[in-house]
Amino acid sequence: MSSATPTPGTPRSRRLPLAGALRPRRPSDIWFKPALSSVASLAPPNLTLLALGRLDLAMYTMAGSMCALYAHNRPYAARARTLLWVILGMVGGLAVALVAAALTDSAVVLVAVGAVLAAAQKVLCDATRVGPPNNVVLTFITSAALFVPQTLGQIPGHIGLALAAGAWAWVVGMAPGLVRPHGPERRATAAALNAAAAYAATGGTGDGHAPARAAGYAAVQAAWQTLLAVPAAGARAATRRALERLVVRAEVALAAPADADPDLLRGWARDLRGTGRVPRTGDRRADTEEMAGVEAELAARPTPLRRRLGPLAPVGVRTALGCALAGWASLALGVGRPYWALVTAAALYQANLTLTWSRTVQRVVGNVAGVLVFAVVAPVAHLHQVFLVLFCLACGFGAEAFISRNYWLGSVCVTPMALLVTEFARYQDPGELITERVLDTVVGAAVGFLAAMAVTNRRAASRVEEALTAVDRAREHAARLLADPGPAPAALDAARRALASALTELRATADAAAGEWWQRALPQERVVLAEQAGHRTLAATVRRRTADADRDAGEPYADRSAGPAAGTTTGTATGTTTEDTRP
């Protein structure tokens, strides 16, 4: 981000990326988990229905089965609750859609209902951060259900099928915990250590230090959120405490990168793979002192849901308007499945307009490529319904395997899967399906993006101001503690974490606002200066914490997680020991 102050003549529109939107990324570390869960949750219900000759009911079981795609990054105690809420949300949306389908056959009304459901699903998923896959799966199921002929008497049975499949999806989602019960929190901690190591490798001033610092603090915040979801008592408490010490070390390295040892941080991250012992930081006394501030972190209250919903109002309006207009435009063109256009529009909306444009490009490219895949597999799939099911399972696996590399790669598999599902009740003309899908994709993408341009997020700049104020307050509080000759260690650690959290929120807010169009100029210089001052204060808290530890112990103190602390002459730890606890 430039440090220059924008002038009144600064253009408010921004260039829209094209090639960058299609560039593949590194796959997720756990890409295979949702991919395998997709197959494990879909296969038994679909194969059972196939054996019974009732594959036409697969849409209802898929509503429950696809809930297994959620919450793979959450600890198992939290995952159990999250999956339950996702299943209830999916079944609740399905019930609304089925009732609407039973009460009216007006496509215009059904599109309106689908748009309202899509907006509600988008806002709730973003507010609760339940994704990936966020709201798209929910919207796909509920929108399709709106256009399935239905009677009120059939609804209880169809909802029962969805609940039964959802229960199986819950079992599939929880099953890996039997093998690696601490997997999610170990991965989150390893990600924080690796991100801190990447920033430490820049020394805090080298090439790419600013994005590496932002990524590091975001990873640490994510690790804390993951650990806070783990029970603080019982069999898992010892492992949680050991992981907390490692996250503290990542925090210290981020605050004082020049004093950190990237190789040691990466070594701890590697040791967290598998089910071995959790690595120790090498100094029990230092661990105990650093953990003084952890209790303050644990006592922090999450932001109330109503406060998280407020900033998402523009996204909700965009989604409702875009989905409704896309569905109605599809109806006007005579397409028999307007929900495809509706779902396309719902899948576009991201945190800002620039990201929405990138998703639009990815959606169109992925869907067009996907219909070509369908054209290839359709002749084989029409030989027998068993091939329909097998191809759907293969596409489901491929979608989850590739979507973390880039959304359009996942769409290449999602599109033929959606087309094959429409043939579960009866075979259809492939040419007609391909034509309608391409048309709905183009209509949904064009109308959806135009709606996003029309409904701008005019509060984005105001939220940057609020984030700046929060950073200033947190920095001033930390500075007052630094001026105190004897601040409590827990208070100083809590102030450091509060400032780190405020800086992370400022960077995320500024990035989101920078991607919006048609808004007043952002205070870019103030953001840069606030970040610089904030990170200087963070480094000062680390130096003060180390100096206090040296004074209390009456001996030089080395923070072995981050190399020699500023102002000390002792060296880093040369090896890694292990915590006496099994995961």
Image (cartoon, grey):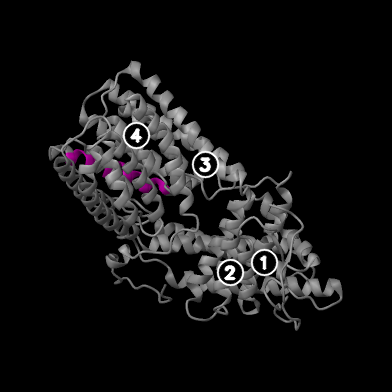
Disc 1 or disc 3, which is closer to the eye?
A: 3
Q: Earlier in the sequence, mark 2 or mark 3?
A: 3
Q: Which residue is drawn at the image coordinates 56% and 64% (left, top)?
A: 217
Q: Which residues are magenta?
A: 312-330
Q: Amino acid at mark 4?
A: Thr
* Separation of residues labelled 2 and 3 (CA atoms): 30 Å
- Could you tell which of marks 3 and 4 lies nearer the N-terminus? 4
> Element type at marker 2?
helix
Tag of residue 249: 1
The mark nearer the N terminus, 4 or 2, is: 4
Callout 1–callout 2 Cβ contact below 8 Å: yes
Choose top left, top right, bottom left or bottom right for residue 327: top left
Identify the residue under disc 2: 196
User: How far is mark 1 from mark 2, CA to CA?
Assistant: 9 Å
Horizontal relation, residue 262 to residue 284: left or right: left
Could you say where residue 321 lies in the image, as x and y percent from the top left? Answer: 28, 43
- Give whichever of 395, 563 is nearer the camera: 395
Measure how far apart labels 1 and 3 are at the Cα level.
31 Å
Question: What residue is pinned by disc 4?
Answer: 142
Give the residue at x 41% y 37%.
43
| First along the sequence among labels 1 and 3 | 3
Is label 4 in contact with label 2 (beta carbons under 8 Å)? no
Whether the magenta-drawn stretch holds residue 317 is answered as yes
Q: Nearer the viewer, residue 477 or 115?
A: 115
Circle on res. 173: 3
